[in-house]
Amino acid sequence: MPPQLPERVQTWMLRCCPLDPARPLVVGISGGPDSVTLVHVLKTLGYTLHLAHLDHGLRLDSHEDVALMRRLAREWGLPLTVEQADVRGYADEQGLSLEHAAREVRYRFLFRVAREVQAQAVAVAHTLDDQAETVLLHLIRGSGLTGLQGMKPQTRIWDAHIPLVRPLLGVTREQVLAYCRFHRLAFRIDPSNMDLRFTRNRIRHTLLPLLEQEFNPRIKEALARLARVVQMDMDVLTALEEETWLQVVLEADETFVFWNLEAFRNLRPGLRFALWRRVARHLRPGVEVALEDVERADTWLENPRPGPVDWFAGLYLSWEPPQRLVVARWEADLPTSLWPQVPFQDRVYPLPLGGQVYLEHGWRLDASMPLPASILLETDLRRTPPYEAWLDADTIPQGLAVRARRPGDRFRPLGMGGHSMKVSDFMINVKLPRRARARWPLVVHAEDVVWVAGYRLAHPYRVRPTTHQVVRLRLVPPKQEEAKKVG
């Protein structure tokens, strides 16, 4: 009597990942027994399938996998998309492990195919054995609840609209092999699956058999059950995490995330750690986030500095004053949408005392009316907030204006004893992001740079002991709620 996998898989899918048999379903097929079984079972159940095979270019005999895929697709009358990728080159370029690079390239390929054929989901052939191995792997690495939940039957980490489904997650590898034997299904075995240099293979061929023999003959089912229990707990925690994410995020896409630094810092440590893990998985779907990765990021947060700092998995951290925390891929092209920017690079905007100039993205520059210098008697000007500056009112008889930098602009930064430097060099020295420099607002008096807004006042305009009247300049950021609407 044949193994009754189709019925078991159908019951599992109806409970965990219901799909419409009439709508296309992309199936990732590698040529191994698991993926071949998945295609055969889904075809038997009447699903509309589109097969997708990626040649990772890592084995000399990979062309034989492709040949088998083409033959099976012809025999089953199913459409097939085959592509080859340079996984090793991608790993080197992105600074990723070969394993993670292969996973990222593979899933991006599968979901691109899914979008092209307007598929309702992408199906992959992970089994209960894979689940047990994954839970043990995460346990060994100390990855916490996120890792102990293992793989979910259905997730949306690679595409916001197309889920990834795992119809065989309740099926053992032994049952898969029995199904292949009964139906005489052709498949290929990847020899790297026997290489004990890889941790997962040592878990599969050494640790799990030992646990079965010495501790629990049904250890795989026990680990899969643990994953299901943790997944239910994580559903509750994920709702809180989602709510918190929306509170701290300023702007995000698939290559970068901007957070409000102060709001993020004020989170409870547990929530902060959860968001560190989440942002890594958002930018590198499927990445393994170890505790030491999170602790390293949180340690950096205690004393962040402008300029990128390498994190892990091709990601970096950066602080952009005053309140923007950046987590991004190294190749990300970050926008200027949250920076104060002069609307037009070639225009000069008068800044009357007691008035203001409106900048892009909700920012503005204010200048106060002249105030008596006595207002600063109890103020330590060395501790002035970066987006505020006090200057001697008598030094600006011709009034103030705001403009972007010009070629050859120089100024004398406060604290340098009156020595001058190029504005462009100053921007580099203070690590003002390159993309923000061209239209960064400068407050000027005639042709003289008075204040590189948010960074440094010019020496000649400083408040002295003999100063009678002062003017306060302020760079005012938009409200956080308004910033979130940008982009």
Image: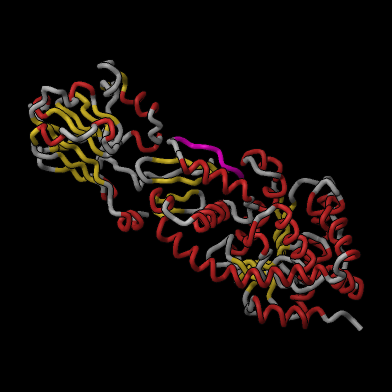
309 in magenta: yes
In the foreground, 446 or 221: 221
Q: Position of residue 482 (x, y in %)?
A: 30, 56
The magenta segment is 307-313
Quadrant showing the C terminus: bottom left
In-image side of 329 versus 288 (left or right): left
Which quadrant of the figure has residue 225? bottom right
In the foreground, 470 or 95: 470
Residue 26 in view here: yes
Residue 75 in view here: no
Quadrant showing the N terminus: bottom right
In-image side of 112 versus 208 (left or right): left
Residue occupying image coordinates x 14% and y 32%:
400
Q: Position of residue 335 (x, y in %)?
A: 40, 45
Please identify the residue farthest to the front as the structure is shown: 378
Q: Position of residue 170 (x, y in %)?
A: 75, 74
Which quadrant of the figure has residue 127? bottom right
In the foreground, 237 or 487: 237
Judging from the image, the colouring scheme is: secondary structure
